């Protein structure tokens, strides 16, 4: 562990440290840069960041609890809306858990597994292009933003062609997929993806050759491989820091083991290398979709999923555009899950985003935060913290309801349970 990371972990409370500095600024929960609610606090020494902190907890939608009151098919609608840009990622992870709970994971038709992978990679393409488009806007390069946003329409149109929707595609379901991809669509899909491949190559050329844009990204918000692992980051963030890890390769699902998957790794840990990772992954996603269309054979696309799922428990991991998405479920013999737990990738990337900004200029805050491709609304967790003693307490919903209904939800009662 580096000395800087050790100081980051052992520093005083933020409010005490911030009092020693010249100035503190707050970014979010309502701010032009943070389109979703999360509050960043930066203590400054002149124009440089001396200390960072973040407060989550502004958006509780009760999705996990809601899933316990709906059947497995109804929950498809909910999980798809955990994150608008990772909708297929969450739904794809959810159906893997459902398949395991019903013990039908080995019977899923091969064609269905290919189609699941195609939709997941189309979403990766649209998410990554959206990310580096907005990165260009954050860095003041709006021409790049407009060009890439225009080119992103190609993949959005393909998703609409295949599923009927540009966002929230409703393609996954336990036991397979909801609809097939007709072979008549193959020529258009291939033609459009080949065109998009050339455009993404041009996007990469712009990143590498535009001196002003590159200067806004290179050696900005750096994090070493060791520190990135200590902080628990995942996905393109950790791959951009030089660590080779991708669930699609290390624990293959769908049909990834049959596809030309490259784990895209770059060593410097700055915003530029994080950008290179996503550009490279976009090109590789196109290559895998084209290979899938050539390899998959005609056949069934779904099997029957039981109305009542026997008692069981299962966990699944997927590599979604922002990193590793984890779903854990428990069944109890009914048509509804007994318990469901979701861990979105941004939750593990926030500490890295805070740490990597220390020592950077205040002007680097937008691109430094953007480097992790944040999605806050799928991240929130709740924990009670006594700011005076730094004690922490996690309680059940039943306890909260009990105290609240009796007018006894006070700090003293909560921490003396």
Image: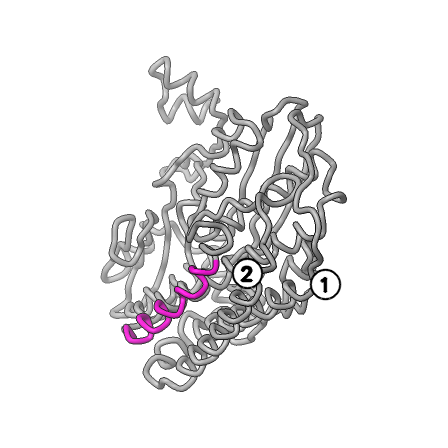
Position of 352 compared to 215: left or right?
Answer: right
Q: Which residue is mark 2?
A: 185
> Measured from the top left, where is residue 54 in percent x and y?
37, 51
Q: Is residue 300 visible?
A: yes
Span highlighted in magenta in the image? 141-158
Main SS category, magenta section? helix
Residue 393 or residue 10, whichever sits in front: 393
Disc 1 crowd, CA 10 A, few/some/many (<14, 14-19, 20+): few
Residue beneath the point at 65% across and 28% down = 331
**Image vertical order of residue 200 relative to residue 343, above or below:** below
Q: CA distance from mark 2 to mark 1?
A: 22 Å
Q: Nearer the viewer, mark 2 or mark 1?
A: 2
- Quadrant assignment, res 43: bottom left
Residue 393 or residue 177, whichever sits in front: 177
> Measured from the top left, where is residue 114 in percent x and y?
65, 56
- Quadrant assignment, res 329: top right
Which mark is drawn over residue 258?
1
Which mark is drawn over residue 3?
none
């Amino acid at each position: 562990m580096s000395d800087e990371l050790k100081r980051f972990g052992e520093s005083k409370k933020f409010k005490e440290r911030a009092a020693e500095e010249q100035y503190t600024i707050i970014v979010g929960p309502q701010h032009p840069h943070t389109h979703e609610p999360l509050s960043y606090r930066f203590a400054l020494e002149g124009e440089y960041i001396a200390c960072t902190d973040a407060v989550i907890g502004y958006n509780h939608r009760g999705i996990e609890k809601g899933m316990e009151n709906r059947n497995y098919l109804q929950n498809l609608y909910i999980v798809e809306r955990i994150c608008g840009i990772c909708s297929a990622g969450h739904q794809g992870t959810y159906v893997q858990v459902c398949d395991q709970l019903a013990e039908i994971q080995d019977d899923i038709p091969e064609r269905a597994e290919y189609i699941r992978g195609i939709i997941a990679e189309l979403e990766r393409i649209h998410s990554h292009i959206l990310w580096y488009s907005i990165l260009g806007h954050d860095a003041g390069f709006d021409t790049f933003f407009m060009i890439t946003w225009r080119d992103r329409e190609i993949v959005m149109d393909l998703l609409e062609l295949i599923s009927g929707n540009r966002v929230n595609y409703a393609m996954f379901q336990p036991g397979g997929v909801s609809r097939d991809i007709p072979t008549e669509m193959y020529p258009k899909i291939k033609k459009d993806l080949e065109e998009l491949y050339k455009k993404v190559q041009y996007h990469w050329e712009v990143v590498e050759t535009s001196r002003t844009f590159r200067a806004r990204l290179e050696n900005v918000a750096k994090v070493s491989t060791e520190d990135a692992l200590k902080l628990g980051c995942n996905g393109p963030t950790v791959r951009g820091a030089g660590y080779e890890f991708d669930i699609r390769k290390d624990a293959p699902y769908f049909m990834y083991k049959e596809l030309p998957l490259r784990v895209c790794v770059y060593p410097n840990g700055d915003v530029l290398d994080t950008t290179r990772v996503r550009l490279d992954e976009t090109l590789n996603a196109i290559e895998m979709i084209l290979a899938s269309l050539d390899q998959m054979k005609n056949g069934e696309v779904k099997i029957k999923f039981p109305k009542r799922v026997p008692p069981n428990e299962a966990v699944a991991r997927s590599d979604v555009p922002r990193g590793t998405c984890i779903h854990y479920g428990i069944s109890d013999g009914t048509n509804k899950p007994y318990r469901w737990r979701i861990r979105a990738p941004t939750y593990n990337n926030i500490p890295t985003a805070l740490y990597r900004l220390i020592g950077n200029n205040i002007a680097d805050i937008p691109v430094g935060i953007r480097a992790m491709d944040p999605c806050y609304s799928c991240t929130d967790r709740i924990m009670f913290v006594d700011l005076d003693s730094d004690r922490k307490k996690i309680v059940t919903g039943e306890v909260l309801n009990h105290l609240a209904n009796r007018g006894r939800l006070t700090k003293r009662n909560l921490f003396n349970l």
